[in-house]
């Protein structure tokens, strides 16, 4: 925000922890190739678009009424999609997983309580904590940004948080966490009765055979697995996120949700997409191919991509990442400068977009100003 705007805001009786802040969000620039916010670059397939249009048209006939407050049909469809013996009472959904995470903090965080995250990780965690007056404390990762079970558990025991955020695959690094880490953190959180959130926003992009923390839910009533339809389901614009957990967790969230928070249009859209998921999952397979192409291409260029189980690649080995980011932008390719020295993050595009990114990057690295570290 410009300083004049900030000054005017500052004259308001704003909450102390909001003073001086700017609204969060990556730049939304008008650039031909957008690879900066890990959206699904493959678009909504035509048959899914048609199914959504039909479902929304049907929902429109009943918009004079409030929607099903319990979004029962959607919870049934999400439980069926996730499998693992989950039932509708294990499922909760909201307007994006950001809202799901906010509701978890509203129910289990708040003044006097603490949430733990392990940066670099999803930048919304501290913001959601602040918005609910939950203290945010940070743990440490290894030099390669990995997190092992012993280290994570020791930090949880020491910091005794009320909530722990584990992001797997982690944003921005793209690398998944072993389930041993989740198990160890869950056990270590016993003393402080910590709610353990595993944010699996990108799970569908993981390499075949990567187990989900959903397998750990039975018998762990403090464990929550968070998912979203924004990435694999290509529905970032529809705003649908969800979680799976013990039924008592979803009951706790019912205490803080706004009545009718999930509109009839949203419910209809999500249901139609779930019913036509084959076409969407075929796109996911192609995105994984493009993701692997990026990892190979970056390696060939002498850069250091992290192993990725997501639809984006975090890569190091850059002397001046901001100059590379700007050079790519000048070439019509927007990627993400996540503020980590020597590194950038790029979302897997369509085949054409991915080729354009790799070619533009190669031209920059071969250009007059050496950009490799
Ligand atoms: C994109 C993303 C989400 C999804 O947010 P929505 O509100 O569902 O769009 C959640 N967690 C992480 C780590 C993400 O990168």
Image: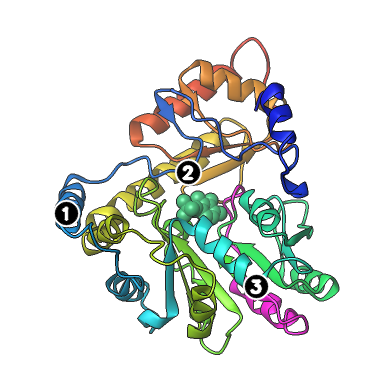
- Res. 216 in view: yes
- Whether residues under marks 3 and 2 lie with C-beta atoms below 8 angstroms apart, the answer is no
Q: Indicate the position of residue 252 as horizontal and vertical percent values.
A: 54, 78
Q: On the image, which quarter does residue 193 sit in?
A: bottom right
Mark 3: secondary structure: helix
- The crowd level at tag 2 (other Cα within 10 Å; few <14, some 14-19, many 20+) is many
- The crowd level at tag 1 (other Cα within 10 Å; few <14, some 14-19, many 20+) is some
Question: In the current view of this chain or complex, which residue is farthest to the right?
Answer: 158
Seen at 64% across and 79% down, the residue is 183
Rounded to the nearest angstrom, the CA distance separating label 2 from label 1 is: 24 Å
Between tags 3 and 2, which lies in front? 3
Which of the image's four quarters has the C terminus?
top right
Seen at 41% across and 27% down, the residue is 33
- The crowd level at tag 3 (other Cα within 10 Å; few <14, some 14-19, many 20+) is many
Residue stretch in magenta: 171-196
Query: Does the beta carbon of the residue at mark 3 sit less than 8 Å from ligand 1?
Result: no
Residue behind mark 1 = 51
Q: Indicate the position of residue 74 as horizontal and vertical percent values.
A: 31, 69
User: Where 160 sits versus 290, above or below?
Assistant: below
First of labels 2, 1 by sequence position: 2
Residue behind mark 3 = 108
354 vs 22, nearest the viewer: 22
User: Where 331 sits versus 87, above or below?
Assistant: above
Query: Does the beta carbon of the residue at mark 2 sit less than 8 Å from ligand 1?
Result: yes
First of labels 3, 2 by sequence position: 2
């Amino acid at each position: 925000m410009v300083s004049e705007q900030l000054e005017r805001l500052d004259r308001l009786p704003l909450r102390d922890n909001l003073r001086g802040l700017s609204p969060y969000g990556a730049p939304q620039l008008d650039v031909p190739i957008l690879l900066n916010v890990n959206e699904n670059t493959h678009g909504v397939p035509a048959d899914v678009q048609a199914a959504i249009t039909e479902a929304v048209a049907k929902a429109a006939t009943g918009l004079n009424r409030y929607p099903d407050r319990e979004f029962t049909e959607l919870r049934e469809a999400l439980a069926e999609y996730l499998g693992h013996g989950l039932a509708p009472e294990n499922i909760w959904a909201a307007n994006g997983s950001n809202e799901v995470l906010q509701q978890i903090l509203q129910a289990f965080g708040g003044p006097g309580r603490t949430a733990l995250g392990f940066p670099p990780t999803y930048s919304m965690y501290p913001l959601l904590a602040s918005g609910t007056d939950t203290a945010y404390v940070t743990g440490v990762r290894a030099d390669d940004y990995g997190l092992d079970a012993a280290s994570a558990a020791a930090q949880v025991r020491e910091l005794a948080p009320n909530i722990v955020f584990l992001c797997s695959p982690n944003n921005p690094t793209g690398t998944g966490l072993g389930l041993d880490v989740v198990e160890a953190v869950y056990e270590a959180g016993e003393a402080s009765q910590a709610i353990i959130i595993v944010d699996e926003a990108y799970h569908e992009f993981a390499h075949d055979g990567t187990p989900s923390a959903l397998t750990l839910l039975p018998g762990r009533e403090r464990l929550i697995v968070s998912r979203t339809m924004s990435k694999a389901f290509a529905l970032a614009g529809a705003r649908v996120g969800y979680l799976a957990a013990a039924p008592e967790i979803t009951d706790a969230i019912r205490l803080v949700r706004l009545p009718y928070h999930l509109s009839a249009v949203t419910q209809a859209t999500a249901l139609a997409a779930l019913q036509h998921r084959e076409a969407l999952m075929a796109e996911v397979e192609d995105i994984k191919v493009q993701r692997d192409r990026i990892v190979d291409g970056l390696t060939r260029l002498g850069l250091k991509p992290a192993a990725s189980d997501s639809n984006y690649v975090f890569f190091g080995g850059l002397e001046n990442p901001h100059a590379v980011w700007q050079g790519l932008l000048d070439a019509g390719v927007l990627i993400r400068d996540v503020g980590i020295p020597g590194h950038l993050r790029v979302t897997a595009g369509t085949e054409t977009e991915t080729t354009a990114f790799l070619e533009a990057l190669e031209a920059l690295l071969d250009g007059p100003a050496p950009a490799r570290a």
